[in-house]
Image: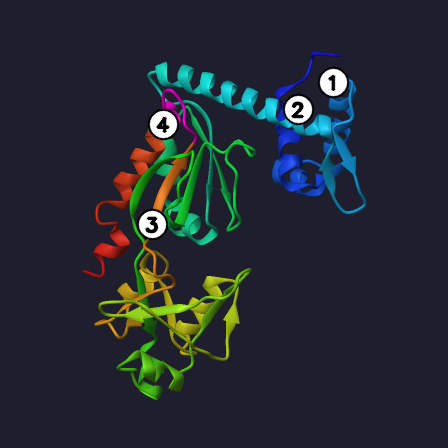
Amino acid sequence: MNYDVSLLEIKLFLMTTRFGSFSDVARRQDMTPSSVSRKMAQLEEKVGSKLLHRHTRSISLTEEGVAFAKQCAEILQQYERVVGQIEQRADTPRGTIRISAPVAFGRLHIAPYLTELLERYPLLKVELQQTDHYVDPAAESIDLLIRIGISQDSSLRMKQFGQQHYVMAASPDYLNRHGEPASPDELVQHNCLVFKGNNGLQRWFIGQEQLQPYEVSGTLYSNNADTLVAGAVAGAGIVVFPTWLIGEELKTGRLKPIMTRFTVSTSVEQQVISALYLETDQLAAKVRVVIDFLAGKYGSPCYWDARQV
């Protein structure tokens, strides 16, 4: 057995076990699939055992691969813990921090502040990955994960920025032409623009003391929120979206909040906006300063909610 196994090979192997495809790993690491495949072949040669079953459309672990993956995950976590401890002792945050965030939230509420962050911490580098898919921070070496949704039990540490609040809205033009619904039951008479993702149509929950689901329909569905927001601004119909997403449209009057005496949401459970990071003995300075920086920018309540007060 050759013990000269690189950290990159371990990371690529863990990502391969996670995604089951050299192509997916290559895309995330800015490599070619053949390069990833070659690295995995070199790794198998070094450990002296076949770790992966290579199928036509997917890749799976051998029995030896399962055991090796478990050990590699522990090694990588230990490495990141040690690096975090070293960075914690440094006076100035330095190095690359890898942040993962939802696409729209990253565009609206992270990207605009990165220049100021990097000017404040000149030894810091930021790699911002924007995706609406699930991310495993350990497998993908993510330092800071911005997540929006229902808070769940997790092995990750969490800093909550605020709760996610929804608004039902339409353009002044649409309301002039079709009128404003006074109650949830009147939505059947209106054109509702509904988000449609991997789990199907997003449900609208509306109520005063208790949220209830309401069936709505319309002429425009999309898995891209920006498309639906643009449609609503153009007068196509009614949307239900978070304040952080349509706050600017509400502020400028391009969209008008409606049925404001009702609470609206896409879930009966409270959703939160939070920063998640791996459990370590000491929080790395680069992670700590970015969390504090974003928390300072967002405020309490978050500025996109403060606009609605």
User: Dot 4 lies on which element?
Assistant: loop
Task: State the image quarter where residue 60 is shown.
Answer: top right
Question: Relative to 77, is 118 above or below?
Answer: below
User: Dot 3 lies on which element?
Assistant: strand
Q: Are marks 1 and 2 in contact (CB under 8 Å)?
A: yes
What is the three-letter code of the residue carrying label 2? Phe
**Disc 3 to disc 2, C-alpha distance:** 36 Å
What is the three-letter code of the residue carrying label 4? Tyr
Q: Which residues are magenta?
A: 278-286
What mark, if any, has residue 272 been given in the picture? 3
What is the three-letter code of the residue carrying label 1? Val
**Disc 4 to disc 3, C-alpha distance:** 28 Å
Mark closest to the chain's N terminus, 3 or 2: 2
User: Which image quarter is the C terminus in?
Assistant: bottom left
Q: Residue at x 74, y 12 (%)?
A: 2
Task: State the image quarter where residue 180 is shown.
Answer: bottom left
**Disc 1 to disc 2, C-alpha distance:** 9 Å
**Disc 1 to disc 3, C-alpha distance:** 44 Å
Q: Residue at x 51, y 72 (%)?
A: 221
Question: Which circle, 3 or 2, is nearer the viewer?
Answer: 2
In the image, residue 12 lies at what x, y percent? 65, 30
What mark, if any, has residue 68 been given in the picture? 2
Give yes or no for residue 282 being in the magenta stretch. Answer: yes
The residue at which mark 4 appears reads as 121
The residue at which mark 1 appears reads as 47
In the image, residue 110 lies at what x, y percent? 39, 44
Q: Residue at x 36, y 14 (%)?
A: 89
In the image, residue 288 lies at what x, y percent? 34, 29
